[in-house]
Image: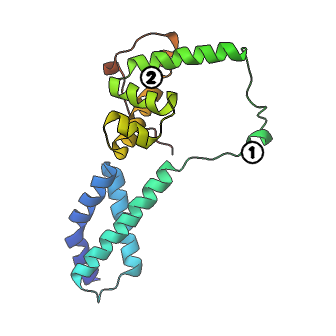
Amino acid sequence: MQEFQSLYQENLGPLYRYIYSKVKNREEAEDLTAQVFLKAVRSLDLMRDPLSTRAWLFHVARTTIVDYWRIRYRGAASSLEDLLETGWEGPIDEEPPLANSSRAAERVQDILQVLPKRDREVLTCRFLLNLSIRETADRMGLTETNIKVMQFRALRRAANLTPMATDSTVISMSSVRISPVIQT
């Protein structure tokens, strides 16, 4: 028991800081740190070298953080059969297809006009010109990784603008708060 108490006191601070740096939430970091030490109590080998034990604790922390994010971002997947069983009758067309497509095209143009130039350019290349990641990167003079990140961020900004841009009004980007969507 004395050995575990010593291990706990020596590693609590560094382990908590590491976990906090990954989750950016004090309460979650505290809970995850507690989970790591609970896992450690169950399978701790006190005969290990202290450095080896510390490395093992950080490995346990990494896997605990991965599990945390996996659970946090796992979305509820519904199959078509499940939806039909609950009474869903499929999409309902309220307007003729041409009216929908012209309205959608107008919305896309409105949203693109509000986005910053680089976001507009990456989305246009990828979705309107149907260029690949590599072709878009070559065209814009950036790396493929950069294009992937820019596309993700541009889509996120566009998604946040969508409800507000339906009236063809121009919205300043300073009035839009961008935050990731978290499903619990």
**Residue name at image x 45 percent, y 60 percent:** 67
Q: Residues within 10 Å of mark 1 (few under 14, many from 20)?
A: few
What residue appears at the point 56 percent right and 17 percent down from the top-left corner? 105
- Vertical placement of 18 versus 79: above or below? below
- Residue tagged by mark 2? 161
**Location of residue 158 (image quadrant):** top left
Q: Is residue 134 left or right of residue 8?
A: right
Identity of the residue drawn at 48% across and 17% down = 109
Q: Position of residue 138 (x, y in %)?
A: 36, 39
**In front of the other: 23 or 1:** 23
Secondary structure under tag 1 reads helix
23 versus 164 height, above or below: below
5 lies left or right of 73: left
Count of all numbered marks drawn on residues in the image:
2
Closest to the camera, between mark 2 and mark 1, is 2
Quarter where residue 143 is shown: top left
Asked if labels 1 and 2 touch by Cβ distance under 8 angstroms, the answer is no
Q: Position of residue 169 (x, y in %)?
A: 44, 9
Residue 20 lies in quadrant: bottom left
Give the amino acid type for the residue marked by disc 2 in the picture. Leu
Which quadrant does the N terminus fall into? Answer: bottom left
The image shows residue 63 at horizontal and vertical percentages of 40, 66
The residue carrying pointer 2 sits among few (fewer than 14), some (14 to 19) or many (20 or more) residues within 10 Å by Cα, namely: many
Give the mark, 2 or 1, whose residue is nearer the N terminus.
Answer: 1
User: Marks 2 and 1, how far apart in space?
Assistant: 31 Å
Question: In the rendered structure, which amino acid carries the disc numbered 1?
Answer: Asp
Q: Which residue is mark 1?
A: 82
